[in-house]
Structures are given as structure tokens and as C-alpha cells.
Image (cartoon, coloured by chain):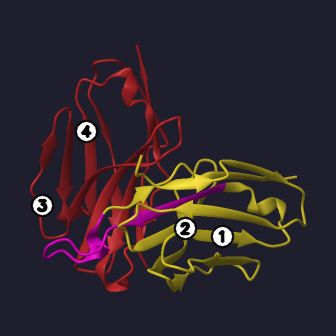
Chain colours: A red, B yellow
Amino acid sequence: AQKVTQAQTEISVVEKEDVTLDCVYETRDTTYYLFWYKQPPSGELVFLIRRNSFDEQNEISGRYSWNFQKSTSSFNFTITASQVVDSAVYFCALSEADTNAGKSTFGDGTTLTVKP
Amino acid sequence: DTGVSQDPRHKITKRGQNVTFRCDPISEHNRLYWYRQTLGQGPEFLTYFQNEAQLEKSRLLSDRFSAERPKGSFSTLEIQRTEQGDSAMYLCASSSPTSGRLPSVYNEQFFGPGTRLTVL
């Protein structure tokens, strides 16, 4: 069975601080995809990034960066120079290839509050 | 706007009543998913369609729940004899078919705004 754990329930930072959101996953599959989604106060989940199990190269997109480490089953997300608009709930999700469904298992989310 | 839409956005009902929610996916997406999200938790998978075929249902989906996607476009989720435990946000998502050499199982899902159900 697949499982995603986001141990940090809530994080509060002051604007311009860097913040890292942790994600640890469990799966028996060798082929899978990991995702990060953002859920702002408006409620709609927004896709941020997808990473497959064969690509451990870190990725940077503007102020966002992702660190995928298969050895520790982690897929952490860092926001550099945080802004108030980054305040949201962030979800990590896992999709296993063997299910052939694409349905995702989500963690319980980390609520990030960025204070001005 | 060509995103995923859901209707209604909010629904308040009394215990025992039936409710129906609608989801309109992005037009070219052949996969449609229903999730349920309660406060403080991530979305939980309920069911999914590929075109008009319902291919998987979660054990969370009791016999009171039924979903359809009759023409492979919009989908409805009906809850019969609602219970207070059904109160949650019901999310719909869609994903695109195979793009290049990547099978669609790997494609990200685009979510709608959700329908918030309150059962009194």
C-alpha cells in the first residue's frame, strides 16, 4: 500500500525567510510519480510539480525548488525568500504506475503561513 | 475559462436527503476523478472514470454513493440518504490522455473548486 507522510502540520515564517516542506512516501513500486500541489485559501488545488521515480535530478523553478532522494524516500519542497502569497496548504502526492489509474494518494498537507 | 468546474459550490442538506453534484472536466481530458477532503486532511480517492467507464471505486465509497459519466464528458456524484459523516469537500479532477511517450497515468490532475457539503 502506498502512503505519503507530511510530518509538519503547520509552519509559520516571516516574509523573505526560506522554508522547506517535508514529504516522505512509501511504495512497493519501482515506477511511480510524485507531485506537489498548492491549495490556497480559495480552496482550489493547483499543480506545482511532477517527478518520476527514475529522475532524481533536483529542480528549480523561480523561488521553488524540489529535492528528490530515493534513498530516503523523500521529496522535499523549498520556497526561497517566501512571500505572503505563498500562504497556503501544500500537499505532496504519490501515484503508482502499477495501479494503472493515475489516482493519487495525498499526504495530509502542511499549512504554511507567511507573515509580513 | 477552460478549467474544471463543479456545481454547486456549496450544498446544505438535512440528514436523510439525497444530493447530486456535477463536475465538468477540461474538455479534452478523458480521465475524471472524484476525491473527498475533510478538514485537516488531504484528498481521499473515491472513484475514477476513463471516458464513460467507471474503472475503480474506493472502499470509502459506500452503497449510498454512485457516480456516472454517461457520455464521457461531465460526471455526477450522488449521495443517497446523507449522513452527517458525509459532510466534506467533494473534489473533481481531470487529466489528459497520453502525451508523447508518457502514459496518462503519469499526468498531473487538474482540480475543480470543489463542492462543500454540509449535512445537518
Answer few, some or many: residues within 10 Å of disc 4's Cα (few below 14, many 20 plus, some between 14 and 19). Answer: some
Local secondary structure at mark 4: strand
Residue B77's disc is 1
Q: Are marks 4 and 1 on the same chain?
A: no
Place of residue A36 in the rendered image (x, y in percent of width and height, measured from the top left): 33, 52
Q: Are marks 4 and 3 on the same chain?
A: yes
**Mark 4 and mark 3: span between their CA atoms?**
16 Å
The residue beneath circle 4 is: A78
Q: Are circles 2 and 1 on residues that touch, CB within 8 Å?
A: yes
Could you tell me which residue is drawn at 49 percent across and 72 percent down? Answer: B73
Could you tell me which residue is drawn at 30 percent across and 25 percent down? Answer: A82
Residue A26 appears in the rendering: no
Q: Earlier in the sequence, mark 2 or mark 1?
A: 2
Picture quadrant where residue B69 is located: bottom right
Amino acid at circle 4: Thr
Q: Which residues are magenta?
A: B89-107
**Mark 2 and mark 1: span between their CA atoms?**
8 Å
Instruction: Single out the mark in the foreground, 4 or 1.
Output: 1
**Mark 4 and mark 1: span between their CA atoms?**
37 Å
For residue B64, above or below residue B22: below
Quadrant where the N terminus of chain A is found in the figure = bottom left
Local secondary structure at mark 1: strand
Local secondary structure at mark 2: strand
**Mark 3 and mark 1: span between their CA atoms?**
38 Å
The residue beneath circle 2 is: B34
Instruction: Single out the mark in the foreground, 2 or 3.
Output: 2
Q: Nearer the viewer, residue B97 or B15?
A: B97
Q: Earlier in the sequence, mark 4 or mark 3?
A: 3
**Mark 4 and mark 2: span between their CA atoms?**
29 Å
Instruction: Single out the mark in the foreground, 3 or 1.
Output: 1
The residue beneath circle 3 is: A56
**Mark 2 and mark 3: span between their CA atoms?**
30 Å
